[in-house]
Amino acid sequence: MSAQQQQKYDLEERTFLFAKNVRTFMKRLPRSICNIEDGKQLVRASGSVGANYIEANEALSKKDFAHRIRISRKEAKEARYWLRLIEPGAELEKERDVLLQEAQELMNILGAIIQKTVNK
């Protein structure tokens, strides 16, 4: 497997794990109307990060690839927003912080991919 293929796989796995970890976090959250509604949005956005990244890897053109990566980054940013709105309670605050950090790191990685794609 080439280095580029390994990187692609790693980011696919990383985005998958982000979505899975968000779902695990959601199952443990205190049930409130706000957490339920914000949580629905968070689950959608977290899953869309990886789904759009996978779509980008199957893109038919450079333009399509860049478009899908931008959507993936947008979804990571949205997931971060919903994570900030969630009210986890004291016992889950650190877990939320880890997810917020991962969302930020995914945004940074995807942003770097966009820059490299645009500058080629």
Image (cartoon, rainbow, N blue to C red):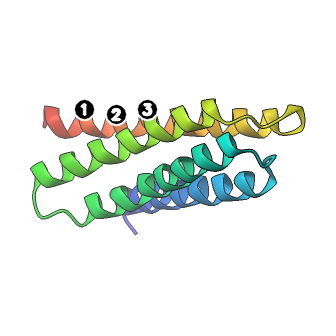
Depth check, front residue: 87 or 48: 87
Instruction: Residue at 67%, 36% (x, y): give it.
Output: 86
The residue pinned by badge 1 equals 115
Q: Earlier in the sequence, mark 1 or mark 3?
A: 3
Q: Nearer the viewer, residue 118 or 19?
A: 19
**Towards the viewer: 116 or 68:** 68
Callout 1 amino acid? Gln
- The amino acid sitting under disc 2 is Gly
Check if mark 3's residue and mark 2's residue have beta carbons within 8 Å.
yes
In the rendered structure, the answer to whether residue 15 lies left or right of residue 25 reads left
Quadrant in which the C terminus is drawn: top left
Residue that badge 3 annotates: 108
Above or below, 41 against 1 in this view is above
SS at circle 2: helix
**Image coords of residue 76 (percent x, y):** 45, 41
Three-letter amino acid code of the residue under disc 3 = Asn
State how far apart marks 1 and 3 are (Cα).
11 Å
Residue under label 2? 111
Instruction: Pinpoint residue 13: horizontal percent, then vertical percent.
Output: 53, 61
Q: CA distance from mark 3 to mark 2?
A: 5 Å
